[in-house]
Image (tube, rainbow, N blue to C red):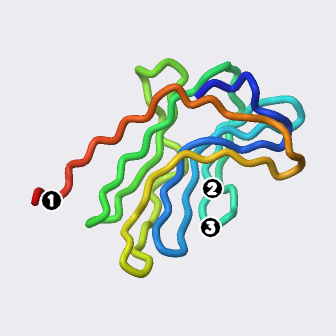
Amino acid sequence: MYLTNIAEGQKAGLCSMGGKTNNLIGVLKKNGQFYVFFETSAKVTEEKLIKTKKIYLKAALSIQDQKNQFYYSLDNKTYTPMGGNFLTSFGNWKGTRVGLYSFNETSDAGSAAFNWFTYNYDGPKE
């Protein structure tokens, strides 16, 4: 994700949504600086100042044993875990969904540029 057009108060990144549980990893711009953060149930539980113009985000989901983990990288080679293991759950008939997001909590400004998205499915075969 390129951070060039991220505006003050904006959050953008990768999410895992399941039932009523939403987990986010992403970048937040506050006080003119970028922070990578982890958020669960609308509460930021970890954040770290970063100095970069782009970031790579990854989710490793292991639904059966609930060992789900987000990662970030500044070089797309070395990935750092962020936020610890998080829970997912089913909602109605839907399982966990993975997606990209961008929103601003303080104004109608900013945009996020996602260059590519890859999904590797390793679940049950039909």
Q: Secondary structure at mark 3?
A: loop
Q: Closer to the N terminus: mark 1 or mark 2?
A: 2
In terms of depth relative to the viewer, which is nearer, 78 or 90?
Answer: 90
Mark closer to the observer (3, 1): 1
Q: CA distance from mark 3 to mark 1?
A: 28 Å
Number of residues whose C-alpha sits closer than 10 Å to that of mark 2, classed few (under 14), some (14–19) or many (20 or more): some
Residue at image coords 56%, 63%: 22
Residue at image coords 40%, 64%: 96
Q: Quadrant of residue 110?
A: top right
Left or right: residue 106 versus residue 46 is right
In terms of depth relative to the viewer, which is nearer, 38 or 17?
Answer: 17
Q: Quadrant of residue 4?
A: top right
Q: Position of residue 91 (x, y in %)?
A: 44, 77
Judge whether 8 appears above or below 69 on screen. Answer: above
- Residue type marked 2: Glu
Q: Closer to the N terminus: mark 3 or mark 1?
A: 3
- Residue type marked 3: Ser
Q: Are marks 3 and 1 in contact (CB under 8 Å)?
A: no
Left or right: residue 77 versus residue 63 is right
For this orientation, the residue located farthest to the bottom is: 92
Q: CA distance from mark 3 to mark 2?
A: 7 Å
Task: State the residue position of label 1.
Answer: 124
Q: Secondary structure at mark 1?
A: loop
Task: State the residue position of label 2.
Answer: 39
In terms of depth relative to the viewer, which is nearer, 100 or 58?
Answer: 100
Left or right: residue 27 versus residue 95 is right
Q: Position of residue 87 (x, y in %)?
A: 44, 66
Q: Secondary structure at mark 2?
A: strand
